[in-house]
Amino acid sequence: MESLLRELTIRKRQLDEVISSTEEILRQAPAGRVRVERRNGSTRYFQVLEAYSHGKYIHKENRNLAVKLAEKDYLSHILEFAKKERALLEKYLGFMKTRSADHLYRTLSEGRKMLVSPVLLDGGTYADMWLAKTYAGNPQYPERLTFRTRRGELVRSKTEVFIANVYFELGIPYKYECPVVLRNGKTRYPDFTLLDIAHHRVVYHEHLGMLEDPDYRKAALIKLQEYGENGIFTGKNLILTSETSYAPFDPERFRNNVWDAFQVEFLRKVIKGGES
């Protein structure tokens, strides 16, 4: 539902802009309308100021008047349809936020939830169920799990603490080192597995924190190649961050990028009851 709401909200904002700009243009448009006449292989234009009138011929040197009148006619129709579409979207968005079928499962008692299998889920309920699924994390080097996040789990570096805390603060559901079984049977443990509610998809995040180490760099490139062979790659569903002595991790830029990529403002304002 959230992905649909997002697209409809974007469409409504587009219509708002079109309506506003169109109304401004029409306020400055010349009077009347244009009549187009095709005769003897040539096209002539007339400015019609009164009903049932053939109009006044527009000479070639005043062709710009015909252009403005034609634009006025076109934009008048655009404005009419845009306002009708916007009204329908506003009504539908208002309904979907409070009474859509996706919200029904959330309203059931805990006892009833145990008896039924949900068919449609709102983003919040889906995220809760996604997070509730347990998993066995990466068994390698457990002694390196020494840094605690705001959510309470242990991670392997201070940068991973910051990354986890950003996801937690922005309300993006995440799992740390959740296993992914590749097509060749190998199991990998991405640093973070994320639920992108706005786009209804799972996204992976690998933080490459030791690129100056040749062995680490080689292993990381092999892992990224394996991800690509399994449909996990940047530009689609993989986030990559890194840090070196000459190119340090930029916390503020990371937070801003996450805010934009996961449509955090949309989720907070639109889905959770804010402005439309």
Image (cartoon, rainbow, N blue to C red):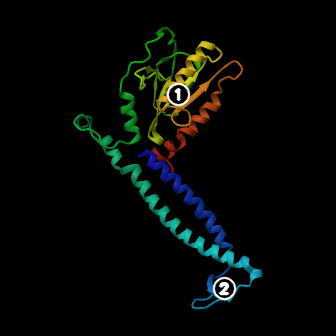
Q: Amino acid at mark 2?
A: Phe
At 60% across and 75% down in the image, what residue appears?
73
Of the numbered discs in the image, which one, if any, rests on residue 205? 1
Is there any visible trace of residue 131 in the rendered image? yes
Q: Is residue 122 left or right of residue 62?
A: left
In the depicted structure, whether residue 199 falls above or below residue 52:
above
The foreground one among 202 and 29 is 202
Label 2 packing within 10 angstroms: few (<14), some (14-19), many (20+): many
Q: Indicate the position of residue 220 as horizontal and vertical percent values.
A: 56, 20
- Which residue type does callout 1 highlight? His
Give the residue pinned by disc 2. Answer: 46
Q: Is residue 276 visible?
A: no
Question: Of helix, strand and loop, which one carries label 1?
Answer: strand
Where residue 227 appears, x then y in whole percent? 50, 27
Tell me the SS state at disc 2. strand
- Residue shown at the point (50%, 52%) measured from the top left: 9
Q: Residue furthest bottom?
A: 53
- At horizontal 71% and vertical 78% (from top left) the residue drawn is 65
Residue 98 screen position, x and y as percent: 38, 49
| Among the 4 quarters of the image, the one containing residue 216 | top right
